[in-house]
Image (cartoon, rainbow, N blue to C red):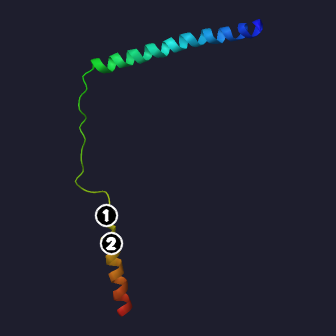
């Protein structure tokens, strides 16, 4: 029983500084984000869509196929 306590004590003692370090880093990050002035990001909007009208293209190919069948 005493051996198990001796084994777990260093593990617990090592976790405490890690926990405190993580809390300190979170606090530091929170303070830094509130003190900096956040500038709005500019987003460019493209007026040209990067896609083509698929239904229009499909209708053209169907028309061509129908015309080819008639000839």
The dot on residue 17 is none
Residue assigned mark 1: 52
Tell whether label 2 touches label 1 (CB within 8 Å): yes
Position in image of residue 47 (x %, y %): 22, 53
Residue in the image at 48% along x and 16% along y:
22
Q: How many neighbours does mark 2 have within 10 angstroms: few (below 14), some (14-19), or many (20 or more)?
A: few
In the picture, the quarter occupied by the N terminus is top right
Residue situated in front as seen by the camera: 16 or 41: 16
What residue sits 32% from the left and 60% below the top? 51
Q: Residue at x 30, y 66 (%)?
A: 53
**Mark 1 or mark 2: whose residue is earlier in sequence:** 1
Please say if 41 is above or below 51: above
Instruction: Give the percent coordinates (x, y) of residue 4.
Output: 74, 11
User: In the image shown, does 7 or 25 lie closer to the viewer?
Assistant: 7
Q: From the viewer's perspective, is 13 left or right of 1?
A: left
In the image, is 46 to the left or to the right of 55? left
Q: Position of residue 56 (x, y in %)?
A: 30, 72
- Disc 1 and disc 2: Cα gap in Å? 8 Å
Q: Residues within 10 Å of mark 1 (few under 14, many from 20)?
A: few
Relative to residue 3, is residue 39 drawn left or right? left
For the C terminus, the quadrant is bottom left
| Residue bearing mark 2 | 57
Towards the viewer: 2 or 61? 2
At mark 1, the secondary structure is loop
């Amino acid at each position: 029983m005493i051996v198990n306590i001796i084994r777990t004590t260093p593990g617990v003692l090592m976790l405490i500084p890690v926990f405190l370090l993580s809390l300190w880093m979170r606090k530091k990050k929170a303070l830094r984000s509130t003190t900096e002035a956040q500038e709005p990001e500019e987003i460019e909007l493209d007026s040209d869509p990067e896609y083509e009208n698929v239904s229009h293209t499909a209708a053209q190919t169907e028309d061509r196929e129908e015309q080819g069948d008639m000839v």
